[in-house]
Image (cartoon, rainbow, N blue to C red):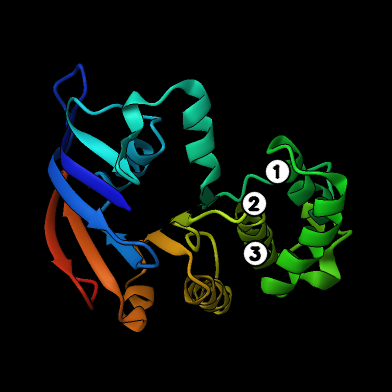
Amino acid sequence: MIFFDRVSKVYPDDSVALSDITITIEPKEFVSIVGPSGAGKTTLLKMLLAEEYPTEGEVFYESKNVHDLSKKDLNELRRKIGMVFQDFRLIPGKTVYENIAFTMEAAGRSDAEIEQDVPHVLELVDLASKVWNFPHELSGGEKQRVAIARALVNQPDVLVADEPTGNLDPVNTYDIVQILKKINDFGTTVILTTHNKGIIDSLGKRVIAMDKGKVVRDDKEGKYFI
């Protein structure tokens, strides 16, 4: 499904973000990408979304080079990839329902689809009771669950979670990880970046370790060490 083919990224100041990265991610996999700050994890994710362009190499999604896509095709690709961020990125003046509905409206979904799908996705993340709350009325863990619901509501093939538990306490971290595992069990490919050793060690899933722009380890059922 996703293939990074000898991808390198060197910035104009000669700093190397990625160096000769080759990775294949299969459909329905749960893959954790770990490594210290500056290892290249976020740059790698931006390559998949064509927010960054490689200096060398190619990135493929379903056999298509993402950096050769037209603007229309690139928008279609991005709709297949749900993104969850550490800082939630919710719209403060909109309710939980409206935050999720806004994403559906942007994708051209009908009012009937919105009315049906928003409650369903909130049930999935155990947040149905908060449908009319505003972001400032939610805990950090609840905000992240809304962010996950928003990323899922257009039924993406891939969910990318970039440090989704970085601002959360251990209890909320555990809850978010359980939701990600449930999403993966339903058949969605999950790509997780994290610094949290406990998360990685508990998952028993594939771990790709990066350091200084290189893949230093790729284990099918890995632990957090570099």
**Badge 1: how crowded within 10 Å, few (<14), some, or many (20+)?**
some
Q: Quadrant of the C terminus?
A: bottom left
Q: Earlier in the sequence, mark 1 or mark 2?
A: 1
Mark 1: which amino acid? Thr
Which is nearer the N-term, disc 1 or disc 3? 1
Q: Nearer the viewer, residue 74 or 214?
A: 74
Residue 116's place in the image compared with 128, above or below, is above
The foreground one among 143 and 29 is 29
Q: Does 118 sit above or below residue 56?
A: below
Residue linked to disc 3: 145
Q: Is residue 141 above or below residue 13?
A: below
Q: Is residue 226 at least partly visible in the picture?
A: no
Number of numbered callouts drawn: 3
Q: Which residue is mark 2?
A: 154
Tell me, yes or no, if residue 182 can be seen here.
Answer: yes
Secondary structure beneath dot 2 equals loop
Q: Name the one closer to the observer, 128 or 213.
A: 128
At label 2, the amino acid type is Asn
Q: Going 69% across and 46% down the picture, which residue do you hit?
A: 90
Give whichever of discs 3 and 2 has the lower sequence position.
3
